[in-house]
Image (tube, rainbow, N blue to C red):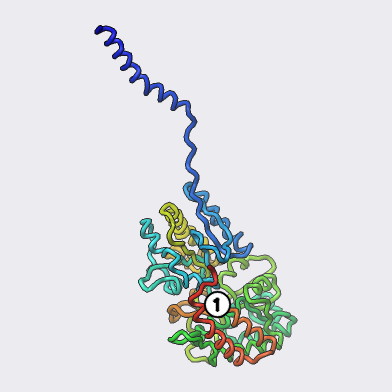
Amino acid sequence: MRTPFLLAALLVAGLVQAAPQQSARAAAQKPPAAPAAPLEVELAHQLDEVQAERLQPLIDRFNSSHKDYQVRLLRRVEGEAPKLLNLVTREQLSGFVAQRAQFKPVSDLMRAEKMALDPARLSPELRAGIADAKGRLVALPVALATPVLYINKESFRAAGLDPETPPRTWFEVQQAADKLFDAGSKCPYTTSWPAWVHVDNLSVWNDGGIADDKGRLVFNGMVQVKHIAMLSSWYKSRFFVTFGHRDEAEQRFADGECGMLTGSSALYARIHDKPGIEIGVSTLPYHDDVRGAPQHTLADGASLWVAAGRKPAEYKGAAQLVSFLLTPEVQVALTARGGFLPMTPAANAAVKSSALREGVVAVKVAQRQLQGRTAARSLRVSQIEPLRIIVEDELDAVWADRKPAKKALDDAVERGNAVLPRALKESPVF
């Protein structure tokens, strides 16, 4: 009896010992588990086709170096909820600020993920409007610029003007436009983004106001009326030609059609080595008969916003992209090849170095303009869509000689103040 029992026990023991071996052999025969798919990080934007194409190589660079996360660009559709990441342009900013409760501050994101981001290291003008009362960055100011003056050097030579001494004041711009016109130019001077250049920046550069302490619009003061009246006389004399309300004039200038342009400082990086045109760049003109001018211009542009209420894994991916954008090599590329204002000390150092001498001429000019008495966060016409449309409508009435400058600006302020409270509360984006 003992022998069969013992034999059975040994057999059972053998089976027990054999089971792991059989299991191991079976496991060895199974195909290896497929690697986990990378988490898709959506980055929504409303850029035009050309701007989106310029952004794609940067995204491809991130994707090639990050296996766990892949960023996908897609166009934002108005009315839809924000995506995980949202690239917001200057004219869309007020809507996102009005809905900031829907977003997670970038400072909080990076602190939670234990990644470096010190808002204090960013220049004050870059933080204006996207930092809260505690100094936290609500969004990342990835692509900011300020308006400057560009000249076509060949057009200047043909008109007998010195291309190495571009105009500094609006009176000098008028003198140059006169000579360019006499030399046959059909577009002596033009501008992009008229509300941004000729209301927002004209006002603060020449120590005028956009809004008073109570938030009421006041950009119909003497400085602004005088300036718009001047442009109106230029328009009638064909010294000043308009092409639209956005950046249409920049392409006309890049094609060599115009002698002078006021536009974004970021434009220089795209066209300074374009065949067939030699350009110069100088500070935005100011009115030399205005006491205290010039003061400072405004830094505006695209910022990166992160949606609230997302999963931890999504926030890890978002933080990885923010960290990537802050790396020295990417910051230098954004400054040198994108023409945007440097955001980090590394990018600032690169601007000062001789290695980037050619690509950052306009950036250096822009930085000089921002060194004056720095503006605190102020209301800006160009960032509030209903207000910008009103201003552009009234400026068009001036160019068409339907209204004098004072009447148009008075009407713009009256109409603007009527819509402003609602415009600041309601988002034109969501």
Q: Residues within 10 Å of mark 1 (few under 14, many from 20)?
A: many
Which amino acid type is shown beneath numbered disc 1?
Answer: Ser
Residue under the image location 40 percent in, 25 percent down: 24
Q: Quadrant of residue 344?
A: bottom left
Task: Pick whichever, 245 or 285, lies toward us.
Answer: 245
Task: Please identify the residue farthest to the front as the structure is shown.
Answer: 1
- Rendering coords of residue 100 (x, y %): 45, 69
Q: Can residue 362 be seen in the rendering of this structure?
A: no
Q: Quadrant of residue 20?
A: top left
Left-right relation of 225 to 293: right
Q: Which residue is mark 1?
A: 382
Q: Quadrant of residue 118?
A: bottom left
Determine the secondary structure under disc 1: helix
Quadrant in which the N terminus is drawn: top left
Tell me if residue 426 comes above or below residue 337 in the rendering: below
- Rendering coords of residue 80 (x, y %): 54, 63
Residue under the image location 71 percent in, 74 percent down: 257
The mark total stands at 1
Task: Please identify the residue farthest to the left as the structure is shown.
Answer: 2
Tell me if residue 115 comes above or below residue 291 in the rendering: above
Residue under the image location 60 percent in, 76 percent down: 193
- Rendering coords of residue 141 (x, y %): 47, 67
Task: Pick whichever, 87 or 146, lies toward us.
Answer: 87
Tell me if residue 290 comes above or below residue 261 in the rendering: below
Q: Can residue 252 be seen in the rendering of this structure?
A: yes
